[in-house]
Image (cartoon, rainbow, N blue to C red):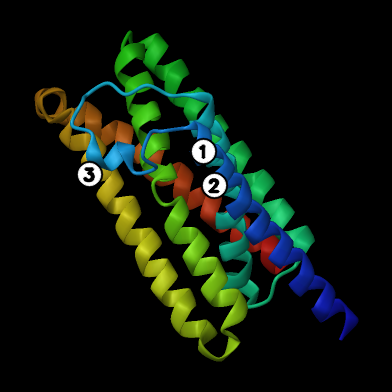
Amino acid sequence: MFEENYSQDIITILIFGSLIIFFLLKKFDKKSIIYGVLTKADIVKLSLFDFYYFLLLILNTSIFISFFKKEVFRLNETALIAFCLLVFFFSQSLAQLAIAWAFNFVKLIFNYLKQKMILANGFLIFIFVINISITYTQSYLHIFLYIGLIFITSYTIFSFLKVLSKHKKIISENLFYFILYLCTLEIIPLFTFYKLLMGEIQS
């Protein structure tokens, strides 16, 4: 009973603490959180606020994954997931930049990575709603978990297509290399990371 109440207190602090930090950031950052979705520009600018939003996204995505896997919140597992997500995203980005440098298309990949982060941050407000729903509506936990998963998958696909649409001319001219890039630096690392993460949580 004590452990259950303790977990509920911790997750309440994390979720509502994240919300307070988010609204404080928005007080100083006038750019829309869904700026990445709204803008039609090929080149976007990252600010320090975008990195703060990204950290909040990592934290709240970790809470969702922890719930989705075990249907219960555990602080140590959430911290492990958050750490793994951070390491994965930054390692993947560094690998992409290294390959881009080797083949002399750093500018293109750098713009792509910026767009990817800004579009990911656009999901932050949705993950807040999802986490609040799965935390305080235990009777409908499975429904909210799968609704959340559908939202995350749909937004991820939409964001990826949005980024690709801005570079469709370059992609169409280099379709083979794009497919090779997609498999080796996006799909395979993500699938491998998913298998490793799920295995780590299960153990």
Where residue 85 sits, quadrant-wise, is top right
Report the residue at 26% width, 51% height from top. 158
Q: Are marks 1 and 2 in contact (CB under 8 Å)?
A: yes
Residue highlighted by disc 3: 161
Where residue 63 sits, quadrant-wise, is bottom right
Would residue 130 be found to the left or right of residue 122 on screen? right
Q: Position of residue 201 (x, y in %)?
A: 68, 63
Q: CA distance from mark 1 to mark 2?
A: 6 Å
Judging depth in this view, the residue of 77 and 178 nearest the camera is: 77
SS category of the residue bearing label 3: helix
Would residue 8 be found to the left or right of residue 153 on screen? right
Residue highlighted by disc 2: 23
Q: Single out the residue that lies furthest toward the right.
A: 2
Would residue 18 be found to the left or right of residue 172 on screen? right
Q: Tell me which label, 3 or 1, sits earlier in the chain.
A: 1
Is the residue 73 above or below the residue 22 in the image?
below
Q: Tell me which label, 2 or 3, sits earlier in the chain.
A: 2
Residue highlighted by disc 1: 27
Is the residue 100 above or below the residue 168 in the image?
above
In front: mark 2 or mark 3?
Answer: 2
Q: Label 1: how many residues lie within 10 Å, few (<14), some (14-19) or many (20+)?
A: few
Q: Amino acid at mark 3?
A: Leu
Would residue 39 be found to the left or right of residue 55 on screen? left
Is the residue 119 above or below the residue 1 in the image?
above
Judging depth in this view, the residue of 36 and 156 nearest the camera is: 36
Report the residue at 47% width, 17% height from top. 98
SS category of the residue bearing label 2: helix
SS category of the residue bearing label 1: helix
Report the residue at 56% width, 70% height from top. 132
Q: Amino acid at mark 1?
A: Lys
Q: CA distance from mark 3 to mark 1?
A: 30 Å
In front: mark 3 or mark 1?
Answer: 1
